[in-house]
Image (spheres, rainbow, N blue to C red):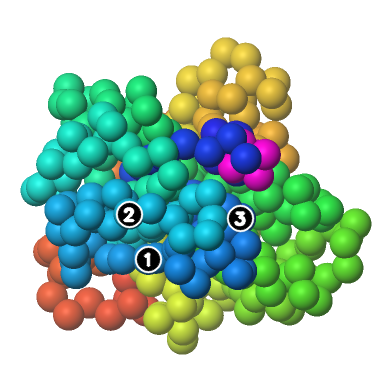
Amino acid sequence: MEEAKRIATDVKNGQLKPIYFLMGDEPYYIDQIASFIEKSVLSEAEKGFNQMTIYGKDTSVDEIVSNAKRYPMMAEHQVVIVKEAQHLSRTIENLAAYAAQPQPTTILVICYKYKKLDKRKKLYKVIKKEGVLFESKKLYENQVADWIRKVLLGKGYQIAPKAAALLVEFLGTDLSKINNELEKLYVVVPKDTEITPQLVEKHIGISKDFNNFELKKAIGERNVQKATRIVNYFAENPKDNPFVVTVSLLHNFFVQLLQYHGLKDRSPKSVAQALGVNPYFVQEYQVASKNYPMKRVSAVVSNLRTLDLKGKGVGAHNMGQHDLLKELLTAIF
């Protein structure tokens, strides 16, 4: 995130490089940087003759080089953006000769999603020397809530930890998808407002009462009645609440609970660091540890692994979501 900001700042200040090679497993920052360059380098009047977007599946490295070697018309620079360049992975090394001696008036942007260059090869080395080589790494699930918090802070908002957890649970680790949902909030929620679970439920459509987050909490508290209500809701809305997602989240929770039992230092800060969770949620592990001794936690983890296989059709023929969810509660309680 910080590196992406630095690149954007340099571009804004006119500190341009002849090649920007944007690669990696997280497409969000690749799209953001490419879009910023697309909008910022040339004026609207200059773009008509001096800016082009081409797609990897419809071009070749030779064509990219040919376009990059053109001179700008009535402008200091031309911008050539290559999207979906991962389709050229077999021949991308052929770009090395141009990268070693790039056209100084061309800004060449390569969007190489879900792949990375081989650091041992020439192309990687020359781009690192002559241009910008940016690797966009996928965030781990336990990092996404903090990413949401930072993004909202930059826009003038705060977010409640539970609201951030709801977004992560519902949207996963796809930053582009999360950002699209946050855009909805910017339109309807005034700045300097805390984003609450109620606002998330109202404007994004995530139920604050019937979700995996609340199920995990109810199970940790051994609140059988509440857990049953949530499970019944899941059974009636299977498309929005896939069993595989539910059992995976609960499995992770009990694995973390097993880790909690093994900790010597159980201060909130230490627990949050050891388990990779927000300090706000440490109390859930404290409560659950009293309701599930270590031996029981081990048995639950084993049961959930078996259920995960059943949910994927292993050892269970035509077992419906409702039956799987009922068995889930039995395996835990």
Q: Earlier in the sequence, mark 1 or mark 3?
A: 3
- Whether residue 299 appears in this view of the structure is no
Asked which quadrant contains residue 301, the reply is: top left
Instruction: Residue 194: give x, y in percent of width and height.
Output: 85, 58
Q: Is residue 34 above or below residue 181?
A: above
Q: Is residue 89 left or right of residue 219?
A: left
The residue tagged 2 is 70
Q: Main secondary structure of the magenta part?
A: helix
Q: Circle 1 sits in a helix, a strand or a loop, which is it?
A: strand
Instruction: Residue 291: give x, y in percent of width and height.
Output: 58, 42
Residue toward you, 17 or 190:
17
User: Which region of the structure is painted magenta?
Assistant: 9-13
Q: Which residue occupies the extreme bottom position in the image?
A: 236
The residue tagged 1 is 53
Amino acid tagged 2 = Arg
Amino acid tagged 3 = Ser
Asked which quadrant contains residue 81, the reply is: bottom left
Q: Residue at x 69, y 23 (%)?
A: 269
Residue toward you, 303 or 77:
77
Instruction: Residue 41: give x, y in percent of width and height.
Output: 57, 53
The residue tagged 3 is 40
Instruction: Residue 55: give x, y in percent of width and height.
Output: 28, 66
* Nearer mark to the viewer, of 2 and 3: 2
Q: Residue at x 28, y 32 (%)?
A: 101
Alpha-carbon neighbours of circle 1 within 10 Å: few (<14), some, or many (≥20)? few
